[in-house]
């Protein structure tokens, strides 16, 4: 008996090349075969087949609509190349390809359909495109502004206009994706007809990823984090987070929602976690003058269960403008990344990073830090207690003096995902002193290296005193971070 998906493919457009997509089932198959809904979303846990399902859905549209233009997007160039495109071409039979322009990332099929692969690092660059179908992979890592620009490209005449997103969920509150695909459709009959979301669990894809992989994930994620990362559910996670006070309304963009932008007159900093043999992270940040304002609501130490707000005087704050998060990259990649940033903005004033970067690698006999120094990139690396950096970050968040650009969705997600090991009740596991090591720990490690370097605490051990009590000058018109010694490097 022919499986439903193969039958559907035959119905869309009979072709000579056999397709074996019989492994799609449940939410995967429902998402792929929904051709009537204008905007569909596939939201799933880790390993639930999101990118594969998006690839299949996109190929089906391409085959059924000869001569159309399709736009395939991912948050970053590397993610587009290493994940989205890799999966797409594993699904698309070579026999259907007319040609592929590797330099332009443009594909033409034998039926006249064209596919453009684009990174959303600079989403304004796609404004002139008129597409019939759009697929955005890992949509939770792009901004609402980027999504609106991309969806606005659905205007090619003569074709049914469809868009698809595939993503892991990232909270409910102040989450544009949840608002656009869940909240608004639930309260608007027209949007309810135009937008539909399919949810999948990691375990639903066991036939393709195996029991061992799932067991490893289940050992890592518990409580509400398991609901998000394994069950594919939108949940607001507070319990167990390292920084539970982080909220989009306080910490994303500037006061009153004013968009954060690069300021040429302010110093530029790089915060590094090299992630040798793992994911590497580089934050691009600036210090900025923060006017007098109120803190976020914080627990009142004198009244249990009560919250209080403090007045914070004029001070120095930290704005996080960009985050480069990549796995398996060598020194040449990171050197090139720094050079591109400096060409686009300005030279970095200082870099702060992971002391592990001084360890030599087997392949080159040199450390990552050595490679960077040879390229004129000097990263200050001082070993300090892990909790020291986290306390500085926590204090800045409490006092609303740390801000993340809304264009850096993966950086925002790293704050909400960074968490402690949890017990079966979803509480922080007793005795745990290190957060869970996952993708979010790398940008957060880089952040605490930068926070400790720029804003060292008053008290330091004699071993670290000389290194900790060093700080760049505050921006003109600002003042040093309260409670922090202000000493030039």
Image (cartoon, rainbow, N blue to C red):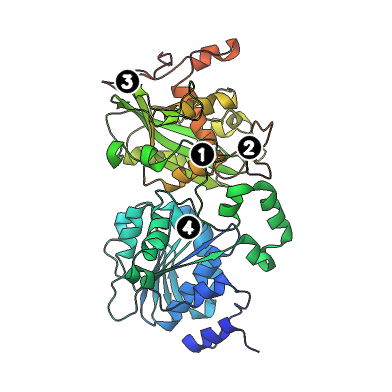
Residue bearing the label numbered 1: 443
Residue 83 visible here = yes
The secondary element bearing badge 2 is classed as loop
Marks 3/4 in contact by CB < 8 Å: the verdict is no
Identify the disc placed on residue 313.
3
User: Which quadrant is home to the C terminus?
Assistant: top left
Q: Quadrant of residue 75?
A: bottom left
Q: Nearer the viewer, residue 212 or 131?
A: 212
Marks 3/1 in contact by CB < 8 Å: the verdict is no
Judged by depth in the image, the label closer to the viewer, 3 or 4, is: 3
Cα distance between the residues tagged 1 and 4: 18 Å
Q: Is residue 285 left or right of residue 478?
A: right
The secondary element bearing badge 3 is classed as loop
Judged by depth in the image, the label closer to the viewer, 2 or 1, is: 2
Residue under the point 35% across and 54% down: 144
Residue under the point 66% across and 67% down: 208
Query: Residue 337's x, y, as percent?
Result: 44, 42
The secondary element bearing badge 4 is classed as loop
Position above or below: 21 against 196: below
Position above or below: 480 against 334: above
The secondary element bearing badge 1 is classed as helix
Furthest residue to the top?
462
Residue bearing the label numbered 4: 138
Marks 2/3 in contact by CB < 8 Å: the verdict is no
User: Which quadrant is home to the N terminus?
Assistant: bottom right
How many numbered discs sit on the rendered protein? 4
Q: Is residue 369 left or right of residue 483?
A: right
Residue bearing the label numbered 2: 428
Q: Work out whether mark 2 precedes mark 4 in sequence or the reverse, and give the earlier one.
A: 4
């Amino acid at each position: 008996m022919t499986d439903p998906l193969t039958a559907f493919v035959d119905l869309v457009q009979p072709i000579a090349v056999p397709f074996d997509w019989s492994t799609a089932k449940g939410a995967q198959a429902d998402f792929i075969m929904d051709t009537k809904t204008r905007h569909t979303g596939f939201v799933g846990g880790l390993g639930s087949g999101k990118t594969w399902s998006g690839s299949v859905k996109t190929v089906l549209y391409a085959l059924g609509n000869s001569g159309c233009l399709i736009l395939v997007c991912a948050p970053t160039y590397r993610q587009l190349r290493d994940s989205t495109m890799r999966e797409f071409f594993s699904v698309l039979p070579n026999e259907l390809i007319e040609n592929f322009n590797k330099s332009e990332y443009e594909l033409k099929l034998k039926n006249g359909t064209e596919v453009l692969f684009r990174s959303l690092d600079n989403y304004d660059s796609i404004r002139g495109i008129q597409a019939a179908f759009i697929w955005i992979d890992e949509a939770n890592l792009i901004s609402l502004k980027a999504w609106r620009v991309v969806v606005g490209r659905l205007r090619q005449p003569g074709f049914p206009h469809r868009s698809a997103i595939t993503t892991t969920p990232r909270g409910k509150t102040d989450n544009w994706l949840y608002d656009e695909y869940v909240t608004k459709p639930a309260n608007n009959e027209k949007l309810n007809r135009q937008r539909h979301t399919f949810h999948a669990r990691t375990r639903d894809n066991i036939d393709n990823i195996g029991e061992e992989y799932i067991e490893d994930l289940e050992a890592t994620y518990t409580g509400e984090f398991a609901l998000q990362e394994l069950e594919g559910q939108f949940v607001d996670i507070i319990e167990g987070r390292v920084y539970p006070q982080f909220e989009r309304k306080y910490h994303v963009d500037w006061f009153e929602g004013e968009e954060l932008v690069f300021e040429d007159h302010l110093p530029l900093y790089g915060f590094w976690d090299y992630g040798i043999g793992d994911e590497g992270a580089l934050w691009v940040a600036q210090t900025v003058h923060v006017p007098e304002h109120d803190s976020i609501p914080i627990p009142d130490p004198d009244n249990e269960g009560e919250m209080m707000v403090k007045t914070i005087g004029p001070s120095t704050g930290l704005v996080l403008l960009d985050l480069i998060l990549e796995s398996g990259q060598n020194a040449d990649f990171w050197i090139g990344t720094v050079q591109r940033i400096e060409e686009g903005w300005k030279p970095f004033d200082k870099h702060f990073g992971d002391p592990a970067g001084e360890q030599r690698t087997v392949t080159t006999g040199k450390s990552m830090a050595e490679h960077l120094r040879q390229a004129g990139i000097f990263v200050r690396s001082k070993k300090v207690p892990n909790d020291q950096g986290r306390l500085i970050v926590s204090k800045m968040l409490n006092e609303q003096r740390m801000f993340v650009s809304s264009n850096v969705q993966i950086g925002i997600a790293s704050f909400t995902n960074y968490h402690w090991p949890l017990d079966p009740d979803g509480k922080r596991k007793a005795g745990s002193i290190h957060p869970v090591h996952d993708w979010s720990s790398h940008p957060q490690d880089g952040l605490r290296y930068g926070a400790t370097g720029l804003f060292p605490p008053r008290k330091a051990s004699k071993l670290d005193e000389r290194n900790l009590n060093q700080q760049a000058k505050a921006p003109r018109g600002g003042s040093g971070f309260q409670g922090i010694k202000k000493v030039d490097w």
